Amino acid sequence: MDPTRKLLVVEDNPSDLRQIIEMLHDSGSNMTVESVETQAAAIDRLAVADVDVMLLDLGLPDSQGLETFVRLRDAAPGVAVIVFTGSSDVEVAVRAVREGAQDFLVKDRVNGELLTQAIAYAIERKHAEQALRESEARFRTLAESSPLAIFVNREDKVVLANPAAAKLFGASSPDQLIGRSALDLFDPASRSLVRERIRVDSEEVPLVEVRIVRLDGTPVDVEATASPFLDQGVKAIQILLRDITERKAADEALRESETRFRTLAESSPLAIFVNRDDKVFLANPACVQLFGASSPDQLIGRSALDLFDPASRSLVRERIRVDSEEVPLVEVRIVRLDGTPVDVEATASPFLDQGVKAIQILLRDITERKAADEALRESTEDLLRSNTELEKFAYVASHDLQEPLRMVTNYTQLLQRRYQGKLGSDADEFIAYAVDGAARMRTLINELLAYSRVGTQGAPFVLTALDGLLDDVLQGLEVTLSEAGAVVTRDPLPEVWCDPTQIARVFQNLIANATKFHGTDPPKIHVGARLEGEEWVFSVKDNGIGIDPAYFDRIFVIFQRLHSRAEYEGTGMGLAICQRVVERHGGRVWVESKLGAGSTFHFTLPAELEE
Ligand code: ADP
């Protein structure tokens, strides 16, 4: 026996004590032995915690029977106790063992060997017991503080539940669960699974998803693990539950958004495919249609690059890369499975597809748009061509007509001068008509010539002070204005880059019209100018007869007039020329008016037109 082991003999009978020491000595034990005679002395001695085992006589001067044991056990819970008793005390000794004594020996029936062995066993048993108690305490703490709900099921009854289990089931304490049928804690729909998998004779059951029912009846989704064990010889099962409501909700949300995106892609009119490792990995129905395939399988697995026209591949390779930023619209050409090329607009956005770099490519067929663009370009070209031809024609016609017209004018005027009053009054009248007609024709031809020359014979733009230009225009119109009794007011005008002769013509036409088309009141005319953004807006406002909005477009067409010559003189060319001039300067011209309520003609000129 280990000499460091310390035995305390509590014995008031000196001969018994001597016998014990002799027996120990005889059996070769060399453990340290001390002795005391009373309970009080024993308690004092045990205060120093170096005693391993106690040999206790239950009949002491200051204490008797079980009482003796209980006091000393409580005084030194870590010390193994062997009750050493006379044969008359055996019943008490048995009770002491029940209360935690390691053993009991009856005096006179022991020898040295038995005593030494009993002492050794008692020490071992005490240690084991203590270790067990400690580990039990540890496990209890673990279970008590575990965030996992834990309960133990024995013979289909809950025999143990931790606070987390109480919380999970909505119980106010674990006691509310104890004694209940474990199966009843589960949702009826989960019970067959629980019955089948969570059995006492099963292996450890890894995670199963089941549904429990809280005490208030609400169901909760949980993940359950079960491990069977022997609880004091009875088959039992420990069940661990984890609330997965949140995880399930997250899963559900994920599934829903996945479905939504899938639906989106499936129903998208844009062709979408996903490229992973230069292979088509996914293609939507619109994509299948675009490539003239009969199903996505015909595209999946193909080299994505091969889907593009050879001429587009370098652009695709360079721009549509997995490590690129999102690539906004590029125009490329794909090749349908039957070999026909299709112009498309492509957008690519790289993303991580389950950790693998991938790229999503959106394609839009732009064949129609391209065709429309082309048609527009062609018709614009046609228009330009026919316009130029028309201009040339108008010029040639008006120019070449001038010569014979001059002859007609000259000779009719000659006739008038020589034969006025000699051929009868009818002849005088006819000649007057011919002279008048020829003069009018000259005006028309001159106007047409002016119109055709706006584009071809305009002067270069110079920076022009419009105030001075307007002064000149008003000067030229002086007679007309004063005859009509017109009053002209004006805003200060800016300097602009323009062809001054042409712009003077515009002001002149508009002011002349404002004077001409007056009502009963004498004309009141205002020339305005205001800067709007990048352009000047000029206006010529009158108080005249006004224009029915139905004719706003018509009055700008050549030779179009709303009145007979008898009512108002004119050729119908003035506004057509104004429009061409303003358009040549990059501006617009329009009218605001109401019949009988005056008119305002507006035109714009760029504010900073550099040469
Ligand atoms: P013209 O003045 O030679 O008739 P324009 O091309 O200048 O030709 O004008 C076309 C028509 O627009 C005019 O005949 C007239 O009916 C209408 N119009 C032009 N200016 C005005 C105005 N200030 N007020 C009313 N009507 C106008």
Image (spheres, helix red, strand yellow):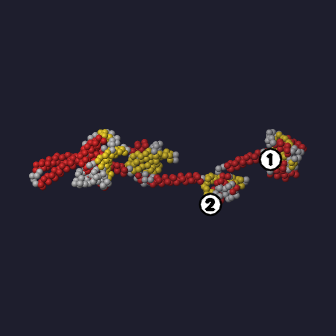
Figure quadrant of the N terminus: top right
Q: Along the line of sight, which residue is nearer the eye, 200 or 164? A: 164
Left or right: residue 251 compared with residue 378: right
Look at mark 1 in the image and give the residue it sits on.
74
Q: Label 1 sits on what residue type?
A: Asp
Give the foreground label among 1 and 2: 1
Q: Is residue 252 visible?
A: yes
Can you tell me whether the CB of the residue at mark 1 lies under 8 Å from the nearest atom of ligand 1?
Answer: no
Look at mark 2 in the image and give the residue it sits on.
188
In x, y percent, where is residue 498?
Answer: 30, 41
Q: Residue at x 49, y 45 (%)?
A: 357
Q: Residue at x 56, y 52 (%)?
A: 250
Q: Label 2 sits on what residue type?
A: Pro
Q: Along the line of sight, which residue is nearer the eye, 601 or 605? A: 601
Look at the picture and state if 610 lies above or below 520: above
Q: Earlier in the sequence, mark 1 or mark 2?
A: 1
Figure quadrant of the C terminus: top left
In x, y percent, where is residue 368?
Answer: 36, 51
View extreme (right): residue? 15
Left or right: residue 354 compared with residue 397: right
Residue 596, quarter of picture:
bottom left
